[in-house]
Image (spheres, helix red, strand yellow):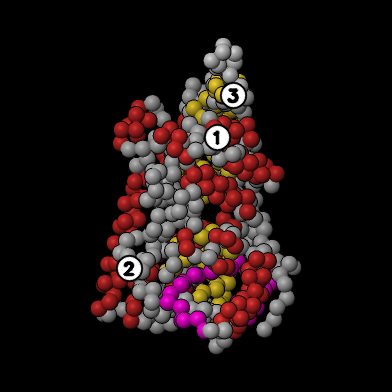
Amino acid sequence: MTVLDSAIDPRNPAYLERRGAMLQRLTELETALEEARAGGGEKAVTRHHARGKLLPRERVEMLLDQDSPFLELSPVAAWGSEFGVGASVVTGIGVVEGVECVIVANDPTVEGGAVNPYTVEKIRRAARIASVNRLPLINLVESTGAAAPTGPPPGGAIARDLSQLTVDRVPTVCVVFGATNGDAAYLPALSDYTIMVRGHAKVLTIHPQPARAAGPNGRPAPEVRSTPTVPAGVTGPADQLAEDERDGLRLARQCVRRFNWRKRGPGPRTLPPLPPRHDPEDLLTMAAADPATAFEPREVLARILDDSDFDEFKPTQGTALVTGWGELHGYPVGVLANLGQAFSPAETQKAVHFIQLANATATSLLFLQYTGAAPAAEPNEAADVRHGAPLVHAVAKSTVPHLTLMIGGTPAAEAGGIYGRAYEPRFLFSWPVERAGEASGPAPYPVGKLPDDGVIDPRDTRTVLGLCLSAVHSAAVEGAEHVGVFRP
């Protein structure tokens, strides 16, 4: 492909500076990850273990096939907020009995697994990923319900999403490990398979009862106040009772084994896939590059794609956008990578044509989003906004899976357009980015929002995207019948 430029040449004085800057950001990210893994702290963890109970990540590890990977989603959600890092829940994708599943595990060491706005968004995002990618969902439940400072409960959103999975014929499994109330109390009843741990599982439902206080004249006051009554015990029969937590996880694996589950999408085209010919360590210095400088996406692709093989599409047209074909862990992909510049009609036409071809060949699309220092707007630029409308239509109507990687310039929380969360890519990950004038790592998420599915080490990009491509092929990959015709 391309020759290493000075930005990734160890002989360049800027190389060590850029590498050091990125390693510092990754150190900050690792600190946040360690805080999430610590849960409610050493005292709470010790007390939890003393009760013979497992931590959420221990439950997940025991549920998964041995030595299989686990792609954790938004692990540092709530970082920088008033709530604990990780939002008291672990979500991700892992393999159970050979089946890729979405897993949600409450962390009872953090205020009893209390639900805050980040928790709700994180669980709902996991349910959405299960739905659109046709992945079975396993809930490992132990939660006290809504956290006190968060105000009203989430209004049944989590329960509603679980019900929708049943409508979509996506299997759901629920293992109840301890006391559970709030929205989580509905999960056992709404799941296809329910397992409860004997002596520990307890589903608590709150039934408001009217209570009137006496007024000054001795008559009942007109206002009605709610006095909750909490009946103990299971509200409905479990499909299976487990003797302990390990037995509950064994029974959950047994349920998945009987799904008779098959992927509907095609498998990898090339096995075994060839690794990139260039060192992924170079991605550290690319990620740490000054956002105001030019960016070369071909160098990134040379360290992500199989055998560093990239067939560029229309290389001499619309040069602010790089498009082309390759394979990633054996899966065919079409790549659209911007160079941090405003699009002209040439880039728009190129992108629309390429998206049409990807849909015609049922090829997943990978968007590499880089936002650098865009040139100053021309006085008549507003009149040219109409040139972007065909691209908006093409992306919105595209039926193949979309993956987005934010590789620099703008944090995912501030990114919009066809690359951002608004256009519902199947997965959206970010590299740690540096804001202008700031030396810190990734910015905290806005309250209650998850702008991406995780901030990742650039060196892990190929692995993360490969796991995502495998997951999206659990569902059928549709063709181009609904894509509007727009030819350059």
Residue 218, position as x, y percentages in the image: 56, 11
Name the residue located 53 percent from the left edge and 84 percent from the top edge.
379
Name the residue located 42 percent from the left edge and 77 percent from the top edge.
373
The amino acid beneath tag 3 is: Glu
- Residue segment shown in magenta: 349-378
Sequence-first disc among 1 and 2: 1
Mark 3 or 2: the one toward you: 3
Q: Which mark is residue 223?
A: 3
Residue receiving disc 2: 437
Q: Confirm or deny contact between disc 3 and disc 1 (CB under 8 A).
A: no
Residue receiving disc 1: 184
Element type at mark 1: helix
Q: Confirm or deny contact between disc 1 and disc 2 (CB under 8 A).
A: no
Q: Nearer the viewer, residue 350 or 422?
A: 422
Residue 144, position as x, y percentages in the image: 48, 31
Figure quadrant of residue 208: top right
